[in-house]
Image: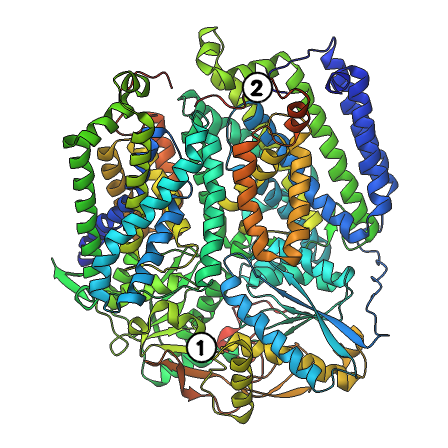
């Protein structure tokens, strides 16, 4: 209790003894319990996936609380929809899929912890989820060490290929490069880069700089705002003063709201200085306000308005399940695809085992809402059609340009000479 | 009970019981995964002991312990990344994440961290020294109470922002993917258990240090400063020095906890050390009983466990629970769990005042 | 040169946003030494008040003008309830108040998330505030001019109330010396409740205004809170004058620093400046001489 003090006869000695004892115990136990050293093989973790019953467990790991819950709950809805559909059609290998849901709480450490729980305690056959690069980077060692599978559904900065992750969102050559191609085609000679201060914008801008140097496009400025920042006066002033032909926007989340309001208010318009965004989908338009963003461009692989039979089914099923006022977006579609791609690979391999899925993944395809997607067995990404969309007054995005057929994934940009200096490939 | 634990025999019994539970019982009953979680929670408990000292005994509400936790964590993570790169590509190799970020040359400030000895020394010295400098700057000018709390909170915010901007420290993603811990494979379950033992051992050491400080003359002075800083000053003591010692000790504890946290969890990023994580460190301490010795440890473990258990089922309910715990415990039970026994025993007496007017 | 003038203006504008967010805090912090961490959530409540009002009224212009007083009431009532239920019972425990109100903030955020959903909602900017005005060769958004105007009105109103009304006199008396004021027959409890009502109401007004430039989501309040606290600390305990000068100084510093560096470094710079500044003036810009020892 705070106000009572008991001074021992010889506190220093007691202390020294306690300390010595604790150190001794720790040292003893720790050294007695040492395992393999660097360079030695560690016995591979035994998979505990149970394939004997009528059901097969998979994990859904999305942030249901915290800042990222805005986006990630929509992805979870799409995962549940795909699982329900597959179960209604008879399941995978005759087994019903059972979802074990976990909350990543928008924190990378929680993602790592929950991934480990799903693999080791719940014994799931595969995990679907993750959103931020930080969450994926945190989960990657967990999946590699436990030799399990993650299906990651969001466009990202590329430069990664893990045996234990399937990437069903776009890598840079399926989103950023097509967006640049489109801008170059429309006669853009100078760009201003605005992004949030984290990995995706920085990598994207490094690629844009290399591309621009090669194609003779001038980069007039590059600014980063702290994630969640709502003060864009300075940046917009600089953009406005630069007189660039277009703006490439890699801002994330709420920052977009403040940015586009400021942008419209200093009198910049989509006609004179269009903004190409890579993180604004149908979900985000509502919060920004259509009047502030109408006519601006976005680069994705899927929009709710994509015309295909598969998409009509998907949109109808989604609205029937979650309400007519809900919209579908690119990450949701990629998450929906990821479940189907996993199921298709399992059917092809006739096994839930990780090594069988890895061996059989190459060439597995799914007739998805965005068009047919095919898994590349070498880098575990999928082929995707790039689409530039324009934001219209009804809050939806409409395709104004699309690539000629699906683009092969190239996460390390090995097929682009101008990108040679960007990365050291393994 | 309390009197018994205040005796030398009692102290030994307490430590022996704790050691038995941590080293004997926990590994027996917990699966490898749960033991890993316990190791993580133990790191939070180590931070909590420091906060208990600075806040419970010294009255300094440090809302910025994430800074010191982060320092220790990043210093350790730098060593692990260096060791990893050198093991794969020889001396002077660039860690893998830098290759991806397009950094070809190893930044000069990274080089010394290939040495384990330098790293451990840095983990012990750097955050402590920073705390001493900052503490002297702040306490000598008699910035205290709410002012200090807000400054320490802003410090945590500024530190996280600064780290996000450093691509050579992994930026927003932070540092992750550690394979070896001082030469031992991190994916080996036996070595993971070893990490847990280290964490548990450090916790015992840290509690022993805190106990010693409490029982010493210094501990009495610290409480005196908390309750009546002016009077201590009138008696001829320099209150600022007394506070700096507690503040720096708390920083040291947090740094060590961060250093152990990194190999246990496998990632450190700005998201774990900003304003909100820093306040969350406080919650466990408040619930356990800020002024007691074992209270912060128990509180931190309980809160971390509850978060894991509850958020699995009810993510939204956990946020409410967190908020309500803050409100109810601090408003109604400022002494935390530790004060419950005392309260029920002699409810006629007024509970111990926990904080003086700042 | 255009950019430079633009940045000076930005400093003023950022400063007035900070000031709006910090004004209420300065009042409550100054009078009671209470740090209200839920202040950010009161701002957020103001934002949602603007949103709901707009949903009901429809016309963006009319609803903005109606939402301002409603926002004041919503924020004020929330603050008044908080004071009556919790803060009143935690006198002499300012640090505990800080933590308790942080808990209140967490709960309010989650309430907003459950009621309005996690995604940001859109509050339409009225027609007459869209676009910009040309001023000395740069384009100044009308929304920012509006916010500057509102900040001036708010500061003037608070100053007038404090200086010329009986209630203001009582508030100043309690700020100066609580015990002496009590002996003079002023009920410090009533005064505290009143101050908290006004201070929190100002947060509500700030929230309504901030929907013009920022987003409206459950975490909106958080973006302003720490900066607002720094303004209060730098400005000095309970001095409106201090808050005004500190807000404008910090806003300008940040805007100018950001031009030559990055937004992130500017934030770190602000912190360093404040720590150094407190070395010179530990009690903030304008110290209030009180007769209390603390």
**Circle 2 sits in a helix, a strand or a loop, which is it?**
loop
Tell me what residue is drawn at x 46 percent, y 82 percent.
A303
Are discs 2 and 1 both within one chain? no
Q: Chain of mark 1?
A: A
- Name the residue at the bottom extreme: A309
Q: Chain of mark 2?
A: B
Is residue A168 in view? no
Label 1 crowd bin: few (<14), some (14–19), many (20+), radius 10 Å: few
On-image quarter of the C terminus of chain B: top left
Tell me what residue is drawn at x 74 percent, y 86 percent.
A90
On-image quarter of the N terminus of chain B: top right
**Circle 1 sits in a helix, a strand or a loop, which is it?**
loop
Observer-nearest of B301 and A301: B301
Tell me what residue is drawn at x 33 percent, y 59 percent.
C214
Observer-nearest of C278 and C23: C23
Marks 2 and 1, Cα distance to the nearest angstrom? 58 Å
**Relative to residue B18, is residue B56 drawn left or right?**
left
**Relative to residue A60, is residue C237 drawn left or right?**
left
Label 2 crowd bin: few (<14), some (14–19), many (20+), radius 10 Å: few
x and y percentages locating residue C225 in the rendered image: 38, 45
Labelled disc at residue B350: 2
x and y percentages locating residue A263 in the rendered image: 28, 66
Is residue A173 in view? yes
In this view, C262 is above or below A240:
above
x and y percentages locating residue A420 in the rendered image: 53, 73
**Relative to residue B121, is residue A288 drawn left or right?**
left
Q: Which residue is mark 1?
A: A325
In this view, B182 is above or below B226:
below
């Amino acid at each position: 209790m705070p106000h009572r003090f008991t001074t021992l006869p010889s506190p220093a000695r007691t202390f020294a003894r306690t300390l010595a004892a604790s150190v001794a115990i720790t040292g003893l136990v720790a050294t007695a319990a040492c395992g393999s050293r660097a360079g030695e093989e560690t016995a591979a973790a035994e998979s505990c996936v149970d394939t004997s019953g009528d059901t097969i467990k998979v994990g859904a790991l999305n942030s249901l609380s915290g800042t990222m819950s805005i986006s990630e709950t929509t992805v979870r809805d799409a995962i549940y929809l795909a699982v329900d559909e597959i179960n209604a059609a008879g399941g995978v290998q005759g087994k019903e899929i059972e979802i074990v849901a976990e909350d990543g709480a928008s924190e990378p450490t929680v993602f790592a912890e929950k991934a480990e729980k799903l693999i080791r305690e719940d014994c799931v056959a595969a995990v679907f989820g993750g959103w931020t690069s930080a969450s994926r980077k945190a989960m990657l060692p967990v999946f590699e060490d436990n030799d399990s599978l993650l299906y990651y559904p969001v466009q990202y900065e590329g430069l990664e290929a893990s045996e234990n992750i399937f990437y069903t969102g776009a890598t840079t050559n399926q989103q950023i490069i097509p967006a640049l191609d489109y801008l170059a085609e429309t006669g853009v000679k100078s760009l201003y880069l605005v992004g949030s201060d984290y990995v995706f914008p920085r990598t994207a801008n490094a690629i844009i700089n290399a591309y621009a140097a090669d194609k003779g496009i001038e980069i007039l400025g590059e600014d980063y705002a702290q994630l969640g920042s709502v003060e864009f006066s300075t940046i917009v002033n600089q953009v406005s003063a630069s007189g660039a032909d277009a703006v490439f926007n890699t801002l994330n989340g709420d920052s977009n709201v403040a940015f586009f309001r400021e942008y419209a208010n200093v009198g910049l318009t989509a006609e004179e200085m269009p903004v190409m965004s890579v993180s604004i989908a149908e979900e985000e338009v509502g919060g920004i306000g259509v009047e502030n963003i109408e006519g601006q461009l976005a680069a994705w692989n899927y929009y709710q308005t994509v015309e295909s039979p598969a998409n009509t089914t998907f949109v109808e099923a989604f609205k029937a399940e979650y309400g007519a006022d809900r919209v579908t977006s690119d990450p949701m579609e990629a998450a929906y695809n990821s479940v189907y791609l996993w199921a298709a690979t399992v059917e092809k391999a006739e096994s839930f085992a990780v090594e069988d899925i890895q061996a059989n993944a190459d060439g597995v395809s799914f007739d998805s809402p965005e068009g047919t997607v095919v898994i590349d067995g070498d880098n575990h990404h999928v082929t995707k059609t790039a689409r530039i969309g324009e934001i219209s007054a009804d809050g939806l995005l409409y395709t104004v340009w699309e690539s000629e057929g699906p683009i092969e994934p190239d996460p390390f940009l090995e097929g682009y000479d101008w990108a040679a200096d960007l990365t050291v490939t393994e | 009970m309390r009197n018994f634990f205040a005796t030398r025999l009692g102290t030994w019994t307490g430590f022996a019981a704790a050691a038995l539970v941590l080293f004997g019982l926990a590994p027996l009953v917990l699966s490898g995964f749960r033991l890993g979680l316990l190791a993580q929670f133990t790191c939070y408990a180590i931070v909590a002991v420091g906060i208990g000292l600075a806040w419970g005994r010294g009255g300094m509400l440090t809302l910025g312990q994430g800074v010191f936790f982060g320092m220790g964590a990043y210093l350790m993570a730098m060593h692990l990344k260096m060791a990893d790169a050198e093991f794969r590509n020889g001396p002077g190799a660039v860690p893998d994440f830098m290759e991806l970020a397009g950094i070809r040359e190893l930044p000069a400030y990274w080089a010394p961290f290939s040495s384990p000895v330098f790293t451990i020394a840095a983990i012990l010295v750097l955050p402590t020294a920073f705390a001493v400098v900052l503490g002297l700057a702040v306490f000598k000018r008699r910035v205290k109470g709410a002012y200090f709390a807000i400054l320490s909170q802003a410090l945590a915010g500024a530190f996280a922002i600064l780290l996000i901007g450093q691509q050579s420290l992994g930026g927003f993603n932070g540092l992750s993917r550690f394979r070896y811990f001082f030469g031992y494979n991190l994916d080996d379950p036996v070595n993971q258990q070893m990490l847990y033992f280290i964490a548990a051992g450090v916790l015992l050491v840290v509690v022993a240090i805190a106990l010693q400080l409490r029982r010493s003359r210094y501990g009495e002075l610290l409480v005196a400063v908390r309750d009546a800083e002016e009077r201590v000053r009138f008696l001829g003591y320099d209150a600022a020095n007394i506070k700096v010692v507690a503040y720096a000790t708390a920083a040291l504890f947090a740094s060590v906890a961060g250093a152990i946290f990194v190999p246990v969890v496998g990632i450190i990023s700005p998201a774990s050390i900003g304003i909100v994580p820093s306040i969350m460190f406080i919650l466990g301490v408040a619930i356990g009983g800020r002024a007691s010795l074992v209270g912060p440890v128990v509180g931190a473990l309980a809160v971390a466990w509850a978060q894991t258990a509850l958020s699995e089922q009810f993510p939204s309910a956990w946020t409410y629970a967190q908020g309500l715990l803050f409100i109810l415990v601090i408003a109604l039970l400022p002494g935390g769990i530790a004060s419950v026994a005392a309260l029920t025993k002699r409810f006629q007496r007024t509970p111990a005042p926990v904080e003086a007017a700042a | 040169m255009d950019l430079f003038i633009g940045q000076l203006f930005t400093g003023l504008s950022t400063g007035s946003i900070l000031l709006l967010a910090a004004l209420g805090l300065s009042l409550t912090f100054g009078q009671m030494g209470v740090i209200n961490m839920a202040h950010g959530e009161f701002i957020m409540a103001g934002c949602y008040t603007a949103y709901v009002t707009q949903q009901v009224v429809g016309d963006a212009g009319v609803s903005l003008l109606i939402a301002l007083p409603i926002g004041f009431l919503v924020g004020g009532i929330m603050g008044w309830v908080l004071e009556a239920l919790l803060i009143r019972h935690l006198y002499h425990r300012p640090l505990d108040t800080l933590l308790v109100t942080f808990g209140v903030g967490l709960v309010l955020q989650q309430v907003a998330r459950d009621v309005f959903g996690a995604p940001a909602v859109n509050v339409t900017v009225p027609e007459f505030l869209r676009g910009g005005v040309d001023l000395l060769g740069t384009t100044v958004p009308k929304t920012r001019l509006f916010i500057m105007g509102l900040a001036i009105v708010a500061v003037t109103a608070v100053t007038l109330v404090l200086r010329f009304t009986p209630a203001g006199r009582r508030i100043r008396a309690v700020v100066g010396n609580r015990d002496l004021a009590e002996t003079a027959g002023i009920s410090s409890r009533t005064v505290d409740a009143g101050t908290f009502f006004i201070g929190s109401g100002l947060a509500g007004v700030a929230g309504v205004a901030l929907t013009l430039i920022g987003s409206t989501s459950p975490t909106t309040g958080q973006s302003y809170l720490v900066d607002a606290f720094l303004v209060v600390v730098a400005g000095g305990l309970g001095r409106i004058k201090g808050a005004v000068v500190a807000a404008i100084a910090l806003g300008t510093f940040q805007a100018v620093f950001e031009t030559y560096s990055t937004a992130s470094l500017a934030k770190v710079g602000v912190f360093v400046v404040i720590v150094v500044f407190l070395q010179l003036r530990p009690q903030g810009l304008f110290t209030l001489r009180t007769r209390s020892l603390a």
